[in-house]
Image: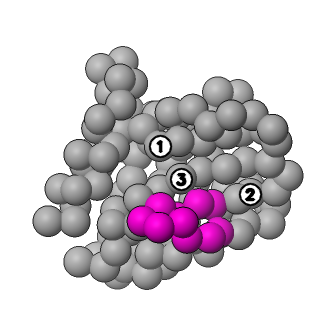
Amino acid sequence: MLRFVFACVLMSGPAMAQVASLSGTDGQNALGTVPCAALAGQPLKNCPAELRRKDDGTATLAVQLDTGEVRRIYFTDGKPDSSSSTSKITSETRGEILVIFIDPGEVYEIPKAALAAQ
């Protein structure tokens, strides 16, 4: 059920019709958009994204930034623990949304239900 909820949330963005897969992803997992900002002070916008879950409780979220770069955020048991950036990663929960910060100014918003253990 949670996987269905995430797919509905991700697939609700208009980018779905335009993006089949992200560069460097296999295209076989949940595709859609997530709110993100690549630079400090930039407003959030919908960025194409792909969530790849594994049976061991880990997941990878690949997000296509407007800079052309794909940022990968790695999760263990629903919590972000690292990314493809060498910069510091932190997060906070705001209601049902997990907000992820990667220094100096990247921001990502992910529905908590999408990362919950099944």
Q: Earlier in the sequence, mark 3 or mark 1?
A: 1
Secondary structure character of the magenta stretch overall: strand
Out of 22 and 40, give the one closest to the viewer.
40
The span from disc 1 to disc 2 (Cα, nearest Å) is: 15 Å
Q: Position of residue 9 (x, y in %)?
A: 30, 46
Callout 3, which amino acid? Glu
Label 1 neighbour load within 10 Å: few <14, some 14-19, many 20+:
many
Q: Is residue 48 magenta?
A: no
Q: Position of residue 44 (x, y in %)?
A: 62, 37
The span from disc 3 to disc 1 (Cα, nearest Å) is: 6 Å
Query: Which residue was labeled with disc 2?
Result: 102
Q: Which SS class for mark 1?
A: strand
Q: Position of residue 59 (x, y in %)?
A: 42, 66
User: Residue most toward the left?
Assistant: 1
In the rendered view, tell whether residue 115 sits above or below residue 7: below
Q: Please count the marks in the image.
A: 3
Q: Determine if residue 110 is in view.
A: yes
Callout 2, which amino acid? Ile
The range drawn in magenta is 91-100
The quarter of the rendered structure image containing the N terminus is bottom left
State the residue at coordinates (47%, 56%): 110
Query: Which residue was labeled with disc 3?
Result: 109
Query: Which residue was labeled with disc 1?
Result: 34
User: Residue most toward the top?
Assistant: 18
Tell whether 97 sits left or right of 91.
left
Q: Earlier in the sequence, mark 3 or mark 2?
A: 2
